[in-house]
Image (cartoon, rainbow, N blue to C red):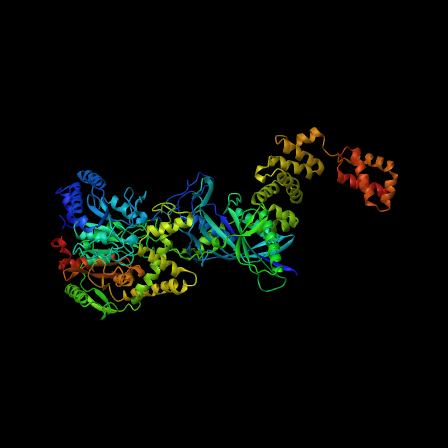
Amino acid sequence: MKDLSLNELKQGLKNKDFSSVELTQYYLNQIKDLNSQINAFITIDEEKSIQQAQQADQLISKNHFSELTGIPIAQKDIFCASSWKTTCGSKMLDNFYAPYDSKVVDLFNKSGAINLGKTNMDEFAMGSSNETSYYGVVKNPWNLDFVPGGSSGGSAAAVTSGMAPAATATDTGGSIRQPASLCNLTGLKPTYGLVSRFGMIAFASSLDQAGPIAKTAEDCALMLNVMADFDERDSTSIKRDKENYTQSLTSSIQGKTIGVPKEFFNNELNQDVKIILEKVMQAYQSLGVNFKEISLPNSQLSVPVYYVIAPAEASSNLSRYDGVKFGYRASNYKDLEEMYLKTREEGFGDEVKRRILVGTYVLSAGYYDAYYLKAQRIRRLIADDFIKAFTQCDLILAPSSPSTAFKIGDKTEDPVAMYMQDMFTISTNLAGLPAISAPAGFINKMPIGFQLIGNYFDEAKILNFTHQYQSISDWHKHLPGGVL
Amino acid sequence: MTWDIVIGIETHVQLTTKTKIFSGASTEFGLPANENACLVSLAYPGTLPVLNKEAVMKAIRFGLAVDAEIAEYSVFARKNYFYPDLPKGYQISQFELPVVNHGHLKINNDGVNKKIRILRAHLEEDAGKSVHGIMDNKTGIDLNRAGTPLLEIVTEPDMSSAKEAIAYAKKLHNLVQWIGISDGNMQEGSFRCDVNVSVKPSGSNKLGTRREIKNLNSFKYMEQAINYEVNWQIEQIEDGHDIIQSTVLFNPDSGETKAMRSKEEANDYRYFPDPDLLPLKISQNDIDFIRSSLGELPEECLKKLTVDYKLNEADASIIVSDKKTYEFYQSLIASGLDAKITANWVVGNLFAKLNEHELSIKDCPIAQEQFVLLIKRIMDQTISNNAGKKIFDLLWEDPDKNVDTLIDALGLKQVSDVSAILPMIDEIIKNNPEMVEQFKLGKDKAFNALVGQVMKISKGKANPGQVSELLKNQLTKS
């Protein structure tokens, strides 16, 4: 069952090979068996999931099918879901129940999908290894001593280990693509504004974007068909006609051009990664795709620019966690100021505090121009580089992560080394562009992905290119079965 | 040493929109605590602001009314600080790029006209309220007001006395109500002023250090506070102390201003553009549409009254000090009444009575048709102005009465018949030779006394104008 695609699951439900309750119970059993080792889920609620599945079975019995009727998926614990606890991986929201559904959860509910549970994540999505979660590190199903990547490490680990067929995730600087790369999955970060941020707990508002993590481009396309929708409750949501992302998956890509940024393929790139990416290029050449060297001259500044802008926004976004209205409140304090201090001291973990401090600093009077304003200017230059590059190519090829997964604890003492995990993914967040990471092979038995970056709203093209690659390769079919 | 006073004012005007500036929650005042605190007002995780277009329209309306530039592109920023009644930990406001720039408002202070420059006006959200004293040792939070749209209107430091400051504040208060963007209710906090005050040696080019008097919501207190603050600053400087830039509060009980604890104001607000909101873009079409619905502004109405109706500036100013009064006055004129007589009646008798009873024009007990009839009877000389006042008072007491019935019942119809008045005049001339003598020596007083005598024997019914005219004729004849 666990190697079936979403389409195959849909077909199975249609053919009555299994019911939604059976399917849901299968995954819940998988979670029961595996989650204690992997720690991919923060919250599971069998009763609720089964109840949803029963409702789906009733619809199926009447032949009422929507996009994902009866199919269970996992939700990253950053998406508010009414009657489900939503923690965002933080002690601050350890007992937080939102009385509303995020737009993403609402769309999945309407599509008939079953919520399997809420997946673990780095605290407030700040991290690249899932080690900052208040609920403990998530282990990489390919080797339990290794990290799954982050911040959507729980979603990635759940899907690759067969605890869920697909999951939602979010990507602020690479949080969908890097765990996808490290867990042998396909993960898509859509264009900023394509998926509503309503009810998705904010980390850095101008960068946060929700997307799917699944086994294949085809599954991602099905997920995106549900997720992409205009929402008037999010002012940055973009109003446009709905697209069908599965429609063009099989279109020929003969004669198309993929750009290769010379700044990403220099001597600093890990040789093993380079060899793997060259094999990806050969596969595309066999599909009739041309390669062209392009330049993204400002992309090297992405990491420092990101680590000014993201913490700045985060420092402000996280001010609401003050113990006054909801979430954690320190139990002993003598006055208001001490309540603030203790609540935030006790409620936030180290990485979150580090970013709040950095963000507060770069926005302070006297530093704003030198940091925040300058970072915004470079951000514009980074975006302009991409816009220029897309006049010469259809998509851009890049590494997804600088290496395969690293060992748990390896980088926790060196935040900058951790931040460099996102060196190939961050520039697209800064530019607001869509990008995918898909399985490209293995180095020392650990998976690694390649990244395709597209122009604004070119998700269909990205999924088409990835699907074409997946139709002549089988990396995405490898499962960590032997390990577990 | 003499001193120049320099005053600038920042006014927070609550805009009358049905819903809050960034959410669909109601703005209704006076509801039980937190009744209007929706998820956005409570800053629940994942909730996002969505701009209320009505608030933008009202800001544009104001900009056009003060002849300002409307920014095609303006930006909402976050002003970050922690306070329990500020649920997000930041206030959404406009900082570097406000929606309204460079307007002005003309004021008239003791007959002197002055242009007060308006530097900017920007949109922002109001905070909630901390409620003290309900629970023991605890502070309550009421977020009903959190997110109510405000327009903050900032002047240049163009006022040089408390009186000018009040004239500006009153003019602004009238304007925002006139153009329908605010109810101007000062008790409910819909119109609150922060006044920046500094002093400098007369004629000096260098501005003194200012102190800001926060949150004044009455013109009376504003005047008291400014006067106190000015005297305090002058005393300090004359005693050799420096003024330290600070925020002060006015205590109406003591009549004094007092600096807030420095901790309460030591804030670095870390402004930056709010990434949850797109820049606000306003098209020329929007501006033209709003301009076309703006209607006559107080300044134009004032001009109409002084130039076309030939009213004096003082009366005209009072009539345009409130849109309802102006509309009332215009409706009187539309019923065919004389502009000047009507202005005298509205500004003099009617306003005196309304003020005495602390009523506004819409609460006037006298029906408009009776008021019109009363002025008509004065215009057509059926009754004298004095008789009119008598009837006015009676109508006020008993609004069901009718003007004509009262005239008849009280026998107030004045005698304008020459054949009836002449014998009375002749009699008075005959009986008062000394006064006639005085008159001939040029004493006006004597003439007035003679008129008084005639009025007296007519029992007040003779038309005083006619008595005066006939008496003059008879005296010069004799």
- Rendered location of residue A240, percent (x, y): 31, 53
Residue shown at 59%/43% (left/top)? B325
- Rendered location of residue A465, percent (x, y): 20, 59
Location of residue A366 with respect to A23 vertically, above or below: below
Location of residue A450 with respect to B364 vertically, above or below: below
In this rendering, would A451 be left or right of B413? left
The one nearer the camera, A227 or A101, is: A101
In this rendering, would B131 be left or right of A188? right
User: Which quadrant of the figure contains the N terminus of chain B?
Assistant: bottom right
Residue A199 visible from this viewpoint: no
User: Which quadrant of the figure contains the C terminus of chain B?
Assistant: top right
Residue shown at 78%/41% (left/top)? B468
In this rendering, would B278 be left or right of B122? left
Quadrant of the rendered image containing residue B426: top right
- Rendered location of residue A349, percent (x, y): 31, 53
Residue B395 visible from this viewpoint: yes
The one nearer the camera, A456 or B196, is: B196
- Rendered location of residue A107, percent (x, y): 27, 46
Quadrant of the rendered image containing residue A186: bottom left
